Image: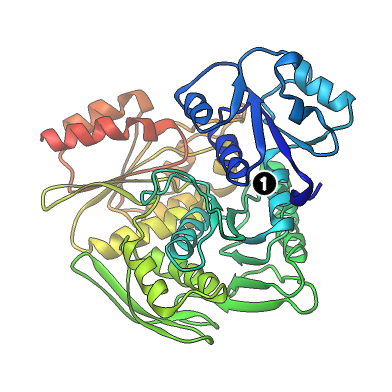
Amino acid sequence: MELKNIKAVYFIGAGGIGMSALARYFMSKGMVVAGYDKTPSDLTRQLEKEGMLIHYEEDLDSIPHACKKALTSLIVYTPAIPESHKELAWFRTNGFEIQKRAQVLGTITQSQKGLCVAGTHGKTTTSSMCAHIIHQSHIDCNAFLGGITKNYGTNYILSEKSDYVVIEADEYDRSFHWLHPWISIITSTDPDHLDIYGTKEAYLDSFRHYTTLIQQGGALIIHKGLEMTPQVAEGTAIYEYSLTEGDFHAANIHIGNGEITFDFISPFGNVTDVKLGHPVPINIENGIAAMAMAQLCGCTEEELRYGMKTYRGVDRRFDFKIKDNRHVFLSDYAHHPKEIYQSAKSIRELYKDRKITAIFQPHLYSRTRDFYKEFAEALSLLDEVVLTEIYPAREEPIEGITSQLIYNNLKEGTAKSIIKKSEVMDFVKSRDFDVLIVLGAGDLDNDVPEITKILQSK
């Protein structure tokens, strides 16, 4: 189903953050938007105020008439909804187009100019940075992102006038294979999600297939030196980028006094004296990719410079909570060894002469099994490492796989300990810290507000 043929969109499980962003997108296009959710929430009530028709009981009679026309209605559901759901079963029986969120994003990229950012790591920051640059330019854009941006306090941006849509392309479960990008960035292809893919080769092949989906005449902006060789359509341009080499790169990098500036080198015109609004060393490289995509879309030199200067970052991505002469405290979503390495390297560059302590909650038994040596090597860049038990997420325990594996492989000279997650607060209360960082994608981040209060009270 093409976007131009859709007159009504019905959401089963309307109250999720990702689903609500799509609902708002379709409302901005003037479509009838309705849906079901199990319970009312602040989000569903706000959606109702904005014009969405929502009900909270499985009831075919409550589905608006406009959403019961199979030829012009799109049904969107979340996998949390059981197949036995009365409304979902009715739509299936009556031949409706029914899609998951990832498929809907693919539908959008077929009808509009999809600007998609893929990669094992860096995609949330790069996509949100690119979306901010373009949104504040004369071009504007829509955006569906993987994190809450500090500039907008949300994970989406809507535009009534722009055909560009920035999308974070998620490789988990091959979701990004639904997309049809006009331009795509690939930040990295370090193997991950091996519980899904099985092998490194299968993971790389998934990215290779993704590159075939870029529309003819579009472009791929790929990090220089990746193992994966892209296979784009004839007439699709390929550009390479990195920190200091490639078609797009940086020069005259200056890091100091809490500020970062550099020159953006591009075959389409250099931009001098770029200042990072979120001054983290890894954001130089993320910024190069974001600026490259925005420049290909037509952003001017001044718009690129202004967008980078005013970008404020994403919640949980190198997210400073305290930054003063006494304490520095931040949290970072990093949960892959390469992400941990980049995070540790960045914080070491920023605070060369200060003691850095990390509290790390490993994420997934399978990832710990596959990469415990790499985790230990990356964490050993820091002065002290405190490990908690593994956050299981969707997995059952694997015999013999614990945080002890990482602990045993930390380099000599690194202060180290293992504590239970329930002991983190007492640990923080009992110690003085110079620079403290919480790392991981599990539930340890829920404790960050309380840790912040404890440190501020000292």
Residue type pointed to by label 1? Leu
Position of 344 with respect to 179 (left or right) is left
Disc 1: CA contacts within 10 A as few (<14), some (14-19) or many (>=20): some
- In this view, the residue in front, 294 or 354, is 294
Residue 396: horizontal and vertical position, in percent?
Answer: 62, 26
Considering only vertical position in the picture, is 100 above or below 351?
above
- In this view, the residue in front, 357 or 177, is 177
Position of 208 with respect to 276 (left or right) is right
Residue 134: horizontal and vertical position, in percent?
Answer: 48, 64
Which SS class for mark 1?
helix
The residue labelled by disc 1 is 194
Q: Is residue 145 visible?
A: yes
Q: Is residue 420 visible?
A: no
Position of 21 with respect to 175 (left or right) is left
Residue 338: horizontal and vertical position, in percent?
Answer: 49, 57
The number of numbered badges drawn on the structure is 1
In which quarter of the view is residue 346 placed? bottom left
Colour basis: rainbow
Residue 247: horizontal and vertical position, in percent?
Answer: 55, 83
- Residue at 50 percent of width and 62 percent of height: 140
Position of 134 with respect to 64 (left or right) is left
- In this view, the residue in front, 153 or 70, is 70
Q: Quadrant of the C terminus?
A: top left
Considering only vertical position in the picture, is 25 above or below 279?
above
- Residue at 82 percent of width and 26 percent of height: 91
- In this view, the residue in front, 372 or 79, is 79
- Residue at 47 percent of width and 79 percent of height: 249
- Residue at 76 percent of width and 51 percent of height: 4
